[in-house]
Image: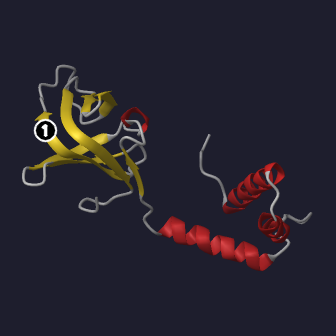
Amino acid sequence: MSSRITEDQAYAAMFSYLNSDYERSPSDGVGALLGSMSIQADGKSADPAAYEDWLSAVRAIRDAPVTFVLRSPAHSLEGTGLHDATLDSLNLDWETGEVVMHVRLVGGIAAELLFHSIKSVLVPRHQPWGRSASINAAKTVAEGMYELEMQSGDLLRLEAQGWSLKIGAAPGEA
């Protein structure tokens, strides 16, 4: 089953979400928006201009790079979706005390995992389980202590003040 939906399905999903929000907490603005967005018996929006505006917004987002940034401590390293991501490169900038890992998430989405204010970095490459550039697990071991278990069996350990994950980042954009 594909996780992709059509533009019409996405419009209906957005309408359903807004409608649920409106039912929980009615507001005039959302009510007016829902009125113009409502889907008629013929499957079309009550306000074709509103639908066209929505399509323009969807296409602008779809065609432009979208970047999301997750940071510690607001987010858990375990919840970043790094399982099965491919580690393309790891760079240590001695002067700034940063380690930047360029990774490709599942689906080929580019991301940069940056650890800042580095105190120590351990990057073994013994590959006891065989060759692999994929990440098996990423976790916070203790405050300021992070581990990335590679599917090669190697365990990367970093001691740093914190981290950020920039999803949708081309190399050098972090």
Please state if 95 lies on the left or on the right of 34 as rendered. left
Farthest-out residue, right: 41
Rendered position, 147 above or below 7? above
Farthest residue, direction bottom: 49
In the depicted view, which residue is nearer to us: 133 or 97?
Answer: 97
Q: Mark 1 — residue?
A: 119
Q: Which residue does the image show at 83% across and 51% down from the upper left?
A: 23
Residue nearest the viewer, comparing 153 with 166: 166
Quadrant housing the C terminus: bottom left
Rendering coords of residue 153 (x, y %): 22, 23
x, y percentage for residue 112?
29, 51
**Residue at 67% across, 71% down:** 54
Where residue 159 sits: x, y (%)?
Answer: 19, 34
Residue located 34% across and 58% down the image: 169
- The kind of residue on which mark 1 rests is Lys
Res. 20 visible in picture: yes
Circle 1: is it few (<14), some (14-19), or many (20+) Cα within 10 Å?
few
Horizontal side of 80 relative to 131 (left or right) equals right
Asked if residue 83 shows in the view, the reply is no
Name the colouring of the figure: secondary structure
Task: Quadrant for the N terminus, please.
Answer: top right
Q: Is residue 173 above or below residue 166?
A: below
- Tell me where residue 165 appears, x and y as whole percent: 34, 48
Residue at far left of view: 94
Query: Residue 50 appears in which quarter of the rendering?
Result: bottom right
* Residue at the (25%, 34%) spot, across then down: 144
**Regarding mark 1 in the picture, which secondary structure is present there?**
strand
Which of the pair 91/152 is nearer the observer?
A: 91
